[in-house]
Amino acid sequence: MKTKLTKIEKIVLVVCVCLVPLTMGIGYMKQSKPKEKYVSIIKENKIAKGNEVALKNKEFHMKRNGKLDTSIENYFYCSAKQAEQIYIEFDKVDPTKVGTYKLSGKYKDKKFKFSIVVDESDNPMIQAEKSSFKYIIGQYSNVEEIKQIIGATAIDKNGNDLTNDIIGFPAQFPSEKGEHTYYLNVSDNQGNTGFLQIDIDFR
């Protein structure tokens, strides 16, 4: 027994019949359209191009009385081998005084200019009578004598004496003679730590 379709049902049926070929046609067109080549976008740093040496930044910051970072790799994009050929005059920076210090790094025929900014801090201050000297190791020499020559004293931001809390002195004489660097340091009750670089040329 045939059922009569209403006017609305007839309209819906016609629309569906028309949409089927239209949808198939669009799908075919998408498939037949040539796909664009996918390119992975990678954000490269300067060292990625030809393994070139490049500065990581134009300005670096450190805290007053903090430890001056002298690791070349922390300032430059470079390999360990390249770092050995880069020279920076770190002695131009005074970690005990707030200010901007302009430095340059030289690699082969290239020169790179940058700044190290020493910012204010609550770090204790260590001072020494001698922070760079020669020491001849004799028969009766001992490391306590080195402490006396250095003559280090320390105070916190409020002027409290922290001299007895200073650590970092040589514990023994080095096995090899020549210049050796030590970092004296002392901390206050709040955990702020002050540093002082000591250079000793053992003979």
Image: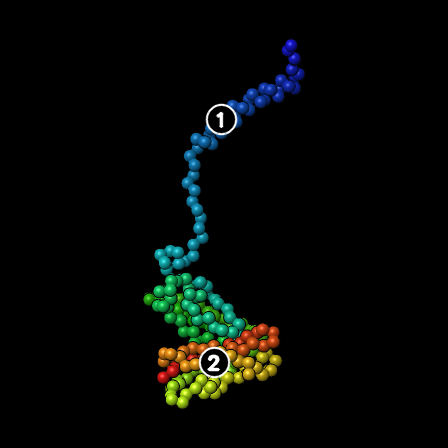
Q: Is residue 120 left or right of residue 29?
A: right
Classify 59 as above or below 195.
above
Nearest the camera: 157 or 181? 181
Spot occupied by residue 91 in the image (x, y as percentages of width and height): 43, 76
Q: Nearer the viewer, mark 2 or mark 1?
A: 2
Q: CA distance from mark 2 to mark 1?
A: 83 Å
Inspect this view and state whether residue 129 appears: no
Q: Amino acid at mark 2?
A: Phe
Quarter where residue 145 is shown: bottom left
Q: Residue shown at 44%/84% (left/top)?
A: 143
Q: Dot 2, crowdedness within 10 Å: few (<14), some or many (≥20)? A: some
Inspect this view and state whether residue 183 appears: yes
Query: Mark 2 vs mark 1: which is more N-terminal?
Result: 1
Spot occupied by residue 80 in the image (x, y as percentages of width and height): 38, 64
Q: Amino acid at mark 1?
A: Gly
Which residue was labeled with disc 1? 25
Spot occupied by residue 151 in the image (x, y as percentages of width and height): 49, 86
Kindly check if marks 2 and 1 are in contact, taking CB atoms under 8 A apart as contact.
no
Nearest the camera: 149 or 145? 145
Nearest the camera: 123 or 49? 123
* Quadrant in which the C terminus appears: bottom left
Q: Is residue 181 left or right of residue 97?
A: left
Classify 183 as above or below 32.
below
Q: Secondary structure at mark 1?
A: helix
* Quadrant in which the N terminus appears: top right
Identify the mark at residue 169; answer none if there is no mark: 2
Spot occupied by residue 131 in the image (x, y as percentages of width and height): 45, 82
